[in-house]
Amino acid sequence: MAIAENRSRSEWQELDRQHYLHPFTDHKDLGEKRSRIITRAEGVYIYDADGNKILDGMSGLWCVNTGYGREELIAAATNQLRELPYYNSFFQCAHPPSIELSRILCEVTPPHFNRVFYAGSGSESIDTMIRMVWRYWDLVDQPERKIIIARKNAYHGSTVAGASLSGMEPMHQQGGILGNIAHIDQPYWFGSDRSMSEDDFGVHTARALERKIEELGADKVAAFVAEPIQGAGGVIIPPSTYWPEIQRICNEHGILLVTDEVICGFGRLGAWFGADYYGVKPDLMTFAKGVTSGYLPLGGVMVGDRVGDVLIDKGGEFYHGYTYSGHPATCAVAIETVNILQREKLIERVRDDIGPYLQKKWATLREHPIVGETRMVGLMGALELVRDNRSLERFDGDSKAGVVCRNFLVNNGLVMRAVGDTIITAPPFTLSHDEADELIEKAWKCLDLTQKALSKGS
Ligand SMILES: *Cc1c(COP(=O)(O)O)cnc(C)c1O
């Protein structure tokens, strides 16, 4: 019997309230309300304990890219658990699933990626990346290169290192940040005063990296890390001038370029990786989420030859690794996820079919009176809520327009997320055209409801 059937919805809610501390949650606030209990899922829909059917416009947390209820992934995990549920890769051991996945990952990543290091999550992969960057500069006798530059409003996870590297003020306020980390502005054109053209703004914000390097001293800077498109920060799509300028600056100053591909990787943008989409050549890429379609937790770092060759040629133990580095069952699920992406040509589908289809419909939401901008690459999009879609005047913070809209959405059977007054979406790659139409219809309806609710309030 499924665990969900053991108790009633209200029993689940009560036990949840008593014992379960949720991530990124105000527990006092949640205790006064009740959690929505999700009991099962199929395709692009989740179902709650009241039997509501909800279109998952976020793919869980940007991860269930191949959709729910995939028998192939379930079989891959089950078969591997039966064969070898666990063994470590310490002490000169390895097992077929982790070796096979390594081979496959080096095949689907750009040609200069020939090695991989496994972690259990995106946050852990960020920690691994930082330690590997420092190890690299030690090995090439430039140990004073320690500073890692990231961006404001970036999200790189929630461990001590991940929260420090992330550029989120509220996280920094709870415990401060580690040393040797610096932040520069993000390429968020709509959020700027828009006095520059988007192209000029892209170059200008990229040059913030150069200004920061000059301020800190190039001989002190180890790496720059960025999401190809910022996800949790509100799907911030950089102007097309941004990434080429970042690449030039990293090359000129010799600093390592790291793309955090935890969301963009494995097809979200209609290319295997964000680096492919933007034509940049990172030295390291962190990944997690979509690599297993979220069915089991796995993360890791793709290691380019510049770093990988040094790690190996110079020798010496890298004192780093996790009990679950290369866990056999998670690797088996990742292998099958890549198989599905290839077999069903899902990345091509995002690039040529459902991506363009949803993008075109998404753009029509710009006509709604409270939408000031829409944007989407692949299946990763955002819209900006504004008081007036001509003047682009924003709602004041107290109106909580984003949260109001998000609540209407979920109560009307569609999950999208609010980041301030930005509404974001990232549906599964398997979304059908009909389901895309449903997403747009529900979004429009909830924009109407939001507009009505907010005009009543003011
Ligand atoms: C989600 C996310 C992380 C953190 O991953 P976890 O698995 O939650 O630790 C890191 N980087 C990016 C870009 C993410 O979106």
Image (cartoon, rainbow, N blue to C red):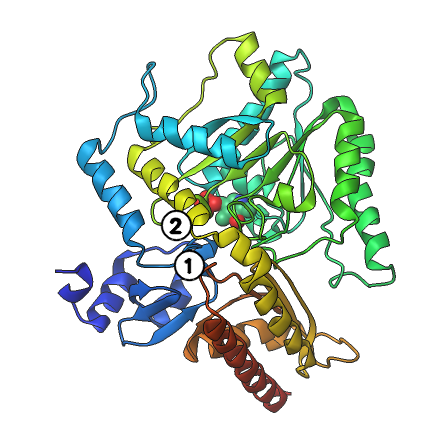
Q: Let me know if residue 400 appears in the view.
A: no
Locate residue 23, reporting x and y percent: 41, 54
Label 1 CB sits under 8 Å from any ligand 1 atom = no
Q: Residue at x 60, y 91 (%)?
A: 456
Locate residue 438, reporting x and y percent: 48, 77
Relative to 329, residue 172 above or below: below
Q: Which mark is residue 294?
A: 2
Relative to 237, residue 90 above or below: above
* Most foreground residue, 292 or 155: 292
Q: Which mark is residue 296?
A: none
Q: Is there a contact, CB below 8 Å, between mark 1 and mark 2?
A: yes
* Most foreground residue, 313 or 83: 83
Kind of residue sitting beneath label 2: Gly
Dot 2: element: loop
Q: Let me know if residue 321 appears in the view.
A: yes
Locate residue 365, reporting x and y percent: 64, 77
- 405 sits to left or right of 140: left
If you read the primary sequence from the N terminus, does the residue marked by circle 1 or circle 2 appear first?
1
State the residue position of label 1: 60
